[in-house]
Image (spheres, rainbow, N blue to C red):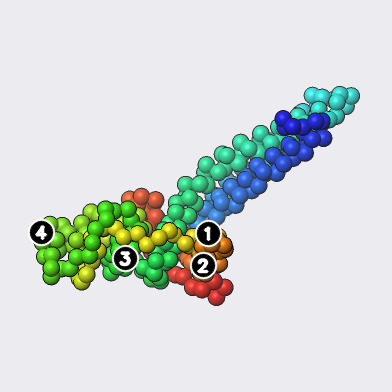
Amino acid sequence: MESATGASDMLQCGKNAYLYWEEKLTESYKNLWAICNALEGHSSEQCREHIAKIEKSGQEYREQGMDLIHLFYGEGDDVQMARLEAQRFNIVAAQKQASAMGSLACPALDNARAIFERQTLLWERGIVKNFDVLSDDILDSAVLGVYNTGVTPLDAGCYLRRDANPELFKASKQNFDLALHAATAADIATYFFGRPAPLRNVTGEYLYGNQADGPVMCRGKMTGVSAAASGIAVRGAIFCMEDPVSEKETRNADMEILLEKNAKAPLGWIVHSVHTHPAGE
């Protein structure tokens, strides 16, 4: 607006601002519809009815406001000024609606995105591929894999063996298993899956500490949320940077995660199952 030299420039700038907030508003409504569809039975129906009413009332509010502005200016006044005022009103209304609707949609979707990214990280490190039900064995193997690859920020250390360092492997007495404190294992598992790891029947060689293996080269992009039998299904694609120099990304795989609602989980959800397959299959 500061560089505008006339009404036409101001109208074009206002048009760009309006289109920006209108896109944000459309995205917010889309996210809200996805959340409604993830609910069960009558709650889902009521949710959709509320969103439809909000959408309709928001549109009516803007239409009535613009009519009022044109009425204030009348037919004989500056038409350009009326257009600018009407446009300003539309921009502010779209911005407020987008912010309000976004605040309703963000918590659940942001949490779903965070969980999807964390499962992508496990997939990239080859720690967890597919499972239909999250079991203690999967939790154990994931915690060990995460700890070994240095995904979790822990103090640097070295490799230890149960037979050579028996004092560190007395799970029943010192609350350790393979040199990993049970509380640390619980934190790692809760971060990735929403619930602690039991660390049962873990044997063999283990890394005590953190050995980072370079930057993350894959990222997940969530593409959809839908209702499922016992929660919500989160779908997305995994993009990996095979050539760090060019930074070109390739869609390597697609992933679907089934989440179950759980108030005790940090993000409100527990991972129930994970399925990945090559992109396009």
Element under disc 2: strand
Q: Amino acid at mark 1?
A: Lys
x and y percent of residue 138 in the render? Answer: 31, 68
Q: Quadrant of the image for the C terminus? A: bottom right
Q: Residue at x 60, y 41 (%)?
A: 98
**Rounded to the nearest whole Å, what is the CA distance between mark 3 and mark 4?**
24 Å
Q: Is residue 250 visible?
A: yes
Q: Residue at x 63, y 37 (%)?
A: 95
Precedes in sequence: disc 2 or disc 1: 1
**Rounded to the nearest whole Å, what is the CA distance between mark 3 and mark 2?**
22 Å
Label 3 neighbour load within 10 Å: few <14, some 14-19, many 20+:
some
Q: Residue at x 11, y 65 (%)?
A: 166
Q: Is residue 145 above or below residue 46?
A: below
Return the residue nearer the eye: 263 or 81: 81
**Rounded to the nearest whole Å, what is the CA distance between mark 4 and mark 2?**
46 Å
Where is mark 1, residue-wise?
221
Q: Is residue 230 visible?
A: no
